[in-house]
Image (spheres, rainbow, N blue to C red):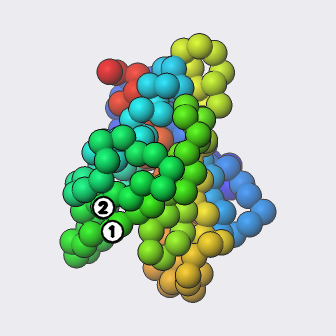
Amino acid sequence: MNSEVHSSDPSPRPRAQILETTDPYLLAVEIDIAAPARKVFDILADANQHSQFDGSGSVKSFISGPRRLYLGSKFSMGMKIKLPYRIKNEVIVFEEDREIGWQHLMRWQWRYQLTPLTENSVRVREIFDGNTARSKRWLEITGALKVNPVMMAKSLVKLKLLAETR
């Protein structure tokens, strides 16, 4: 399954690698970003910026929450998958400049792990963990486990472009 997703930019194309896992409910994608870990983490810790790097097109707007996320903080997002809706998330993992993650009512988790490569570059791994979901069956019915890796790869390409061009 090791595959790559490219942006639509005709210049040198950023790539995010979809990683193989042995767990069908655990999805992982990674990319190297030419920016300090702090800069990338600051983007991830600001829910107001999430729609700017969402590769699925479903994250539409920040509705409420703290200006900067922290462990235990709650934030709401305006979403749209066919119909508009709101989703409330809670930050469940927070280690400054290293890892941030959240879950919502259905309890699947989104995490971002940052591994500095140099002072000005970082490897970012995005992880979707459906093992904690209230309904694994819902993930299967909606096809999320099949489409999420590609959407996650698109998100990381957008995150890379956002972090490197600011």
Contact check, label 2 and label 1, Cβ < 8 Å:
yes
Q: Amino acid at mark 2?
A: Ser
Label at residue 125? none
Disc 1 residue type?
Ile
Q: Which residue is mark 2?
A: 76
Residue 87, numbered label: 1
Q: Earlier in the sequence, mark 2 or mark 1?
A: 2
In this view, 105 is above or below 57: below
Residue 64, visible in the rendered structure: yes
* Relative depth, front residue between 49 and 10: 49
Q: Residue at x 53, y 26 (%)?
A: 37
Image location of residue 36, percent across then percent down:
51, 20
Return the residue found at the far front.
Answer: 72
Q: How far apart are the two marked residues, 2 and 1, measured between alpha carbons?
A: 5 Å
Foreground residue among 4 and 115? 115
Q: Residue at x 54, y 57 (%)?
A: 92
Vertical order, 82 against 75 (above or below): below
Image point (59%, 40%), residue name: 95
Q: Does dot 1 land on a helix, a strand or a loop? A: strand
Give the image quarter of residue 135: bottom right
